[in-house]
Image: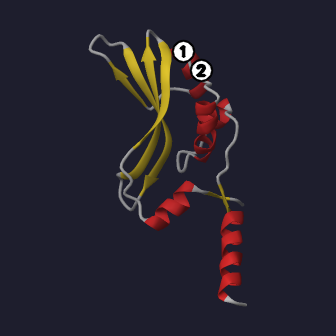
Amino acid sequence: MNKMTNTFIFFILVVTLCSCDERKFDRDGWINDDPVDYSNRRSMVNDILHNKILDNKEISQVTDLLGKPEWVDTAKSGVVIKMYYIVQLSYGYDIDPKFSKLLELEIDNGKIKNVKIVMGIDRRSYIEKIFTNYKIVS
């Protein structure tokens, strides 16, 4: 086989094994996701954003859907102004994450005003990025 054929076969193999598995939001899948890789959350976050599932919902409605947030920001008055849910955490060989992706919910008057993805500085190697951004189909 020539080099072009080998490259094509390799490309098809990689595309077959790797999946950008997007799926519809599912409450149980989100809440009970495996914290090792958060593969359910990563595949559902686009549905949350594109279909505006959380827009104008009250905090209690959001916690019913997504569960308790990992972090909450409050104003000096104690009013919740932002809530954060982990979408992806990638660790290296130590306890500090090399990459984080969070779902940030901005709150105004007790309702969701804005929903967006917030990403931390990416300190993963090229190979780590490949294997932590795609779910291997089994």
Q: Which residue ends up furthest to the front in the rendered image?
A: 4
Does 99 sit left or right of 18 as displayed?
left
Does 11 sit left or right of 109 as displayed?
right
Residue 108 in percent (x, y) is at: 43, 13
Q: Toward the viewer: 104 or 77? A: 104
Q: Toward the viewer: 136 or 106? A: 106
Residue 79 in percent (x, y) is at: 36, 12
Residue 134 in percent (x, y) is at: 59, 56
| Residue positioned 54% across, 62% down in the render | 131
Does 35 sit left or right of 24 as displayed?
left
Q: Toward the viewer: 45 or 97? A: 45
Q: Helix, strand or loop at disc 1?
A: helix
Q: What residue type is labelled 2?
A: Asp
Which residue carries the number 1 mark?
60
Q: Can residue 56 be seen in this view?
A: yes
Which residue carries the number 2 mark?
64
Do the numbered discs 1 and 2 sit on residues whose CB atoms are within 8 Å? yes
Q: Residues within 10 Å of mark 1 (few under 14, many from 20)?
A: few
